[in-house]
Image (cartoon, rainbow, N blue to C red):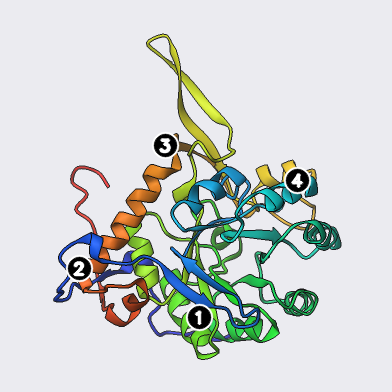
Amino acid sequence: MIIESDLKLDFKDVLIRPKRSTLQSRNDVDLNRTFKFLHSGREWTGFPLIAANMDVVGTMPVARALARFGAMTALHKHYPADALISFFQEEEVGNVFYSLGMTEADHDKFAAVKAKAPVDKVCLDVANGYTERFVDFVARVREENPDIVIMAGNVVTGDMTEALLLAGADIVKVGIGPGSVCTTRKMTGVGYPQLSAIIECADAAHGLKGQVCGDGGCTVPGDLSKAYGAGADFVMLGGMLAGHDECEGDIRYEDRDGKSVPVAMTFYGMSSDTAMRKYAGGVAHYRASEGKTVEVPYRGPIEGTMQEIAGGVRSMMTYIGATKLKEVPKRTTFVRVGAQLNTVFGS
């Protein structure tokens, strides 16, 4: 048994210190970044935000909506092959990841879709990225698809970030347990504070010229600012993008003045009993649910939320004098705090 006693931080533990700036307006900053990926050699330019590959959020309508902001979407893996083929044939897909797990059925469906449609990005997604089997799987997908951008995870430490990059990943997905509907930390006791995970994994990845995607833990736009400041090249969002018209959760209506009005939408983790009943016939006897099912307020079109997120990040950049998003880590100084918000009138 080993105890690591050095300090580890989450988003709630810090604020970003402002710095003198010559910027005059939020219009003066550039949210786009350009990356050339390590193994595939492909280039991408856009706002490095990714909708999570959860079946409520990682939808085709969300992908179309986020593309208007230059942001990306990882489609959930439960779409049938025909629907995926049609989508990738008909849409501008430069901002879309195809998602798959490690089963042979997942692999065969991906091969069938790729044979008929121009898929150029793939998300290899498992809850536990620490198994040798997963590292071998990343290497297999890279060998079979040398020109595709591969995002793989999830991990929270520098050593496994390096292992996945060396196996063939271009982007490593960082986060175990920080999600709003994830109960992995409660059920297993396993996890890592998300801000420190991003800092440490980004440091390891950038030494190999790879990228990281901070996955989970963001609850407000300021958390994205902190993730970018910590070195995240991409940030993946689930709960912050749930509850919108473009999502696919069940909507609850209430009668108000004789009209049926949408008030809430179902949102659940992909390791929840809800998801496992839907896709696997229930929770297998050898495992437990590691996700929860909740209702989030109905929020209308996703465009409004994206404008809030983009506006918050732009404002952060003016506070620290960063003209371009890629400058943010170099201009970020984190200050440890005991509290962030004045909650006298609510949080």
Question: Mark 4 — residue?
Answer: 279
Q: Is 4 positioned to the left or the right of 331 in the image?
A: right
> What's under tag 3, amino acid-wise?
Arg
Of pointers 1 and 3, the one earlier in the residue sequence: 1
Q: Residues within 10 Å of mark 4 (few under 14, many from 20)?
A: few
Q: Position of residue 221 (x, y in %)?
A: 34, 56
Q: CA distance from mark 3 to mark 2?
A: 29 Å
> Which residue: 42% across, 36% down?
299
Of pointers 4 and 3, the one earlier in the residue sequence: 4
> What's under tag 4, amino acid-wise?
Tyr
Question: Mark 1 — residue?
Answer: 201
Query: Which of 161 and 320 lies nearest the eye of the viewer?
Result: 320
Q: CA distance from mark 1 to mark 2?
A: 26 Å
Q: Find numbered disc 2 in the image and state the secondary structure of the residue it sits on.
A: helix
User: Is any part of residue 317 visible from this angle?
Assistant: yes
- Establish if 7 lies above or below 64: below
Query: Which of 312 and 289 lies nearest the eye of the viewer?
Result: 312
> What's under tag 2, amino acid-wise?
Tyr
> Which residue: 22% across, 73% down?
320
Q: Is 103 positioned to the left or the right of 344 in the image?
A: right
Q: Find numbered disc 4 in the image and state the secondary structure of the residue it sits on.
A: helix
Quarter holding the N terminus?
Answer: bottom right
> What's under tag 1, amino acid-wise?
Cys
- Establish if 273 lies above or below 74: above
Q: Position of residue 58 (x, y in %)?
A: 59, 50
Question: Mark 2 — residue?
Answer: 319
Of pointers 4 and 2, the one earlier in the residue sequence: 4
User: Is any part of residue 339 visible from this angle?
Assistant: no
